[in-house]
């Protein structure tokens, strides 16, 4: 359960990126508190109002934003006319730095998980002097090897669901790069093709998490249609391009995080993001502490929540 009650933003707006995109942002908590940026997952999931309940609103100035193409940011990726060429990891890093300048923040704590951990690491390795601490749950670095595991390797646990997912791609693509195949389907001119592909993708994502004892069932496929379309279009684009990161670049660059305290909280039961990724990162980042949660998967658990709360509480007074 969330530690703090729901809160509404005291300020919000749209950040003009200068290239036709408007990035939605919100501020909650204490206007004079310690700045903390929440980086959402996906990519393309949009900000979660529940995530702000993890931070003490009396001590943190809580900052959230919708990454390009999703949530309240425009243009929305669910619209097939939206140009996706200006939606890359580099663009998101620039948006974060532009937002920091816009809000007058000197340095901030970064908090997030899943895809959010990749974006956090990419930003922090580029601007380490702007990061005070990092708290990550469900670590991923979006290496091609990790993507291949999530959309092919883990199929050994879900053979029936995998065959249904594979069948969603065209016959010519089923034995090749299935992520790229779905990315092409999400750019199809036929709305029925895009909708079917989004549903098939969300169903597979749900299957991978279906063995976890905690969390809501079917967290992907129950999303509103426009949000699901945006999520799948953005995710397939990013993952089919390796997030525009050289393979292993974030792990190799972890030495740039020296001096930044970090807490990595990872569930041992996480099939979508195996624990080995968090272990590798913690081994390469001297100031990071890895907490392995025995009863948690990707969707978290009460035990995982407590470890995240404890880290954020500790850093609030730092």
Image (spheres, rainbow, N blue to C red):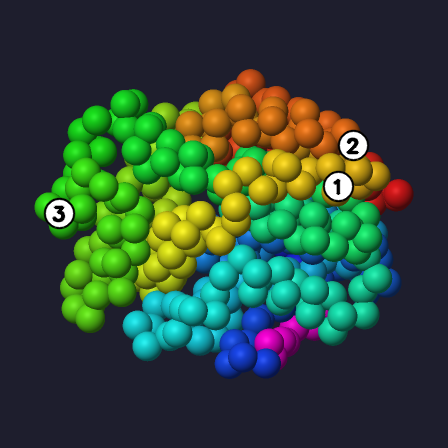
The residue closer to the viewer here, 255 or 262, is 255
The residue closer to the viewer here, 280 or 295, is 280
Would you name the residue on which mark 3 appears?
A: 172
Circle 1: element type: helix
Residues in magenta, as a range = 8-17
Picture coordinates of residue 25 (x, y %)?
62, 68
Picture coordinates of residue 240 (x, y %)?
37, 50
**Label 2: how many Cα within 10 Å (few below 14, some 14–19, many 20+):** some
Q: Are marks 3 and 2 in contact (CB under 8 Å)?
A: no
Work out which quarter of the rendered image holds the C terminus and state it.
top right
User: With respect to residue 114, does 76 lie above or below?
Assistant: below
| Magenta-drawn stretch contains 277 | no
Residue extending farthest to the right is 318
Name the image quarter holding residue 30: bottom right
Circle 2: element type: loop
Which circle's residue, 3 or 2, is located before the other in the chain? 3
**Label 3: how many Cα within 10 Å (few below 14, some 14–19, many 20+):** few
Would you name the residue on which mark 1 appears?
A: 257
CA distance for labels 3 and 2: 47 Å
User: With respect to residue 82, does 146 lie above or below?
Assistant: above
Which circle's residue, 2 or 1, is located before the other in the chain? 1
The residue lying at 83 percent from left, 39 percent from top is 259
Of the numbered discs in the image, which one, if any, rests on residue 10?
none
The residue lying at 54 percent from left, 29 percent from top is 277
Of the numbered discs in the image, which one, if any, rests on residue 287?
2
The residue lying at 70 percent from left, 49 percent from top is 124
Picture coordinates of residue 267 (x, y %)?
54, 26
Q: Is residue 280 left or right of residue 273?
A: right
Q: Are marks 2 and 1 in contact (CB under 8 Å)?
A: yes
Q: Is residue 104 left or right of residue 116?
A: right
């Amino acid at each position: 359960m969330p530690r703090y009650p729901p809160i509404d933003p005291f300020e919000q707006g749209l950040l003009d990126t200068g290239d036709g995109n408007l990035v939605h942002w919100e501020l909650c908590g204490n206007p004079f508190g310690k700045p903390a940026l929440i980086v959402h997952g996906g990519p393309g999931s949009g900000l979660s109002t529940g995530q702000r309940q993890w931070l003490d609103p009396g001590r943190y100035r809580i900052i959230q934003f919708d990454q390009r193409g999703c949530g309240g940011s425009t243009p929305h990726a669910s619209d097939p006319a939206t140009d996706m060429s200006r939606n890359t990891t580099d663009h998101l890093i620039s948006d974060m730095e532009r937002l920091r300048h816009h809000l007058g923040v000197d340095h901030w704590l970064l908090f997030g998980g899943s895809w959010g951990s990749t974006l956090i690491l990419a930003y922090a390795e580029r601007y380490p002097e702007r990061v005070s601490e990092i708290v990550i749950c469900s670590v991923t670095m979006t290496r091609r090897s990790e993507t291949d595991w999530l959309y092919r390797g883990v199929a050994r646990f879900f053979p029936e669901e995998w065959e249904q997912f594979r069948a969603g791609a065209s016959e010519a693509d089923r034995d090749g790069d299935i992520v790229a195949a779905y990315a092409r389907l999400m750019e199809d001119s036929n709305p029925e093709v895009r909708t079917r592909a989004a549903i098939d993708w969300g169903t597979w994502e749900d299957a991978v998490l279906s063995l976890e004892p905690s969390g809501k069932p079917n967290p992907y496929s129950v999303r509103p249609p426009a949000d699901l379309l945006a999520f799948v279009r953005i995710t397939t684009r990013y993952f089919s391009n390796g997030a525009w990161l050289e393979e292993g670049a974030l792990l190799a660059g972890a030495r740039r995080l020296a001096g930044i305290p970090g807490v990595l909280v990872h569930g041992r039961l996480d099939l979508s993001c195996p624990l080995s990724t968090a272990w590798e990162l913690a081994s390469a980042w001297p100031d990071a502490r890895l907490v392995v949660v025995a009863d948690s998967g990707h969707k978290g658990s009460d035990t995982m929540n407590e470890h995240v709360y404890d880290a954020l509480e500790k850093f609030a007074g730092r």
